[in-house]
Image: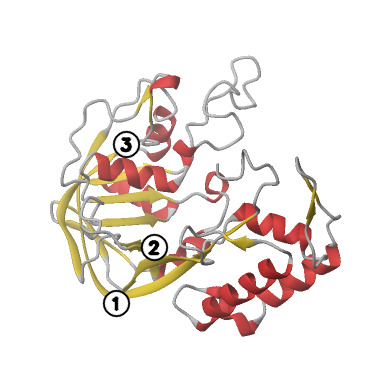
């Protein structure tokens, strides 16, 4: 996975200008951050020689070796319990083959969404083929269940075997005192809470037994254009699990805003009106009277990856083993 611990990297950045680490018994004395040194290390790690540092590549091997070398140089010790620098992380890499279409149907009417241009999808299940066949499509608003905000977008709906369509981000509740601003007392105001993250939407779909979870992409609440989402058509990595992630929805993905509006029109629903209703506590899931079908054929490979772990031993014998 090569998720190099952020605190270690931050400390390394602070110390890279120095080849030694000094400390008093109670607290370390750190040198000032050397901006030029940080830039040089960043340029090296971002160079073509490191190939993007992706898991299972030569670039990852170079990155791991480089980090270990620098952590040694600044006086840190191996941080893994077995005395090494490396925590082994077994990953599974999944790549969708070809350009499968996603099909919405309502009676004799059919709408086919093009791979990558109209939608992107993948599976977290370690399966060479996953399929959703004529699964009822249900709109669940922002897909949030948050007792602390008295919010439940699901209200007893049965999503088992169905396709869940959900908005990205938190419900944008206006501030009662300043309607042009977001309410700071609900969902973090202008900040995004975890309820707004795409990972949360997929987790809720899995929890409620959905066959597929499709997030409607909108650039402003997502914080990035659809071109970023299209990058997920490349190989996707996940931790290797005993059950092969059988508990996840078979299909996870995104659809463009234009295709979402077309889907709602196909269902005889007004996109703007339903989206506005979703920003209320009274919202309840809406079955669109449309089915969704898609099949993903996948190339799967096991990828041995690694985390790099380092530690600074306390100068206080009483605290050293905590």
Q: Which mark is residue 153?
A: none
Q: What is the distance, in whole Å, between disc 1 and disc 2 at their CAs? A: 17 Å
Could you tell me which secondary element the residue under label 3 belongs to?
Answer: loop
Relative to the observer, which residue lies in front, 120 or 37?
37
Question: In the image, what residue occupies the spot 36% across and 67% down?
Answer: 90
- Rendered view: 30 above or below 298: above
Q: CA distance from mark 1 to mark 3?
A: 30 Å
Tag 1 residue: 97
Q: List x then y, in percent, for residue 269.
A: 31, 38
> In which quarter of the view is residue 303 placed?
bottom left
Dot placed on the residue nearer the N-terminal end, 2 or 3: 2
Label 2 vs label 3, nearer the camera? 3
- Check disc 2: other Cα within 10 Å, few if <14, some if 14-19, many if 20+: some
- Mark 2 residue element: loop
Residue highlighted by disc 2: 118
Can residue 267 be seen? no
> Mark 3 Cα within 10 Å, few/some/many (few <14, many 20+)?
many
Mark 2–mark 3 distance (CA, rounded to whole Å)? 20 Å
295 up-or-down from 213: above or below: below
Closer to viewer: mark 1 or mark 2: 1
Taking 176 as reference, is 76 above or below it? Answer: below
Q: Residue furthest front?
A: 317
The image quarter containing residue 174 is top right
Q: Are marks 2 and 3 in contact (CB under 8 Å)?
A: no
Which is more toward the observer, 321 or 123?
321
Where residue 55 appears, x then y in whole percent? 46, 73
């Amino acid at each position: 996975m090569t998720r190099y611990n952020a605190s270690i990297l931050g400390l390394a950045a602070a110390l890279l200008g120095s080849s030694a680490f000094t400390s008093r018994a109670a607290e370390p004395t750190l040198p000032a951050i050397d901006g030029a040194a940080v830039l040089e290390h960043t340029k090296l790690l971002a160079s073509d020689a490191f190939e993007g540092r992706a898991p299972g590549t030569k670039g990852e091997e170079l990155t791991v070796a480089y980090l270990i070398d620098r952590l040694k140089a600044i006086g840190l010790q191996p941080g893994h319990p077995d005395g090494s620098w490396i925590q082994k992380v077994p990953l599974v890499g999944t790549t969708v083959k070809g350009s499968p279409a996603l099909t919405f149907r309502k009676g004799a009417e059919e709408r086919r969404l093009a791979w990558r241009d109209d939608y992107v999808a993948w599976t977290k299940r370690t399966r060479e083929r996953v399929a959703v066949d004529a699964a009822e499509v249900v709109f669940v608003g922002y897909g949030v269940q948050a007792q602390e905000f008295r919010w439940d977008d699901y209200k007893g709906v049965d999503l088992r075997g169905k396709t869940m369509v959900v908005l990205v981000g938190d419900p944008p509740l206006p501030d009662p005192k300043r309607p042009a601003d977001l309410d700071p007392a609900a969902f973090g105001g202008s900040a995004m809470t975890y309820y707004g993250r795409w990972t949360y939407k997929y987790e809720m779909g899995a929890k409620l037994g959905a066959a597929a979870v499709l997030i409607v992409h909108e650039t402003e609440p997502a914080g990035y254009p659809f071109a970023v989402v299209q990058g997920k058509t490349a190989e996707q990595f996940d931790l290797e699990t005993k059950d092969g992630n059988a508990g996840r929805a078979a299909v996870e993905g995104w659809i463009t805003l234009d295709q979402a509006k077309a889907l709602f029109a196909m269902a005889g629903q007004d996109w703007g009106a339903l989206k506005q209703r979703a920003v209320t506590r009274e919202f309840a899931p809406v079955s669109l009277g449309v089915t969704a079908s898609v099949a993903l054929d996948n190339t799967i490979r096991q990828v041995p990856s690694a985390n790099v772990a380092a530690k600074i031993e306390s100068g206080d014998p009483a605290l050293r083993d905590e």
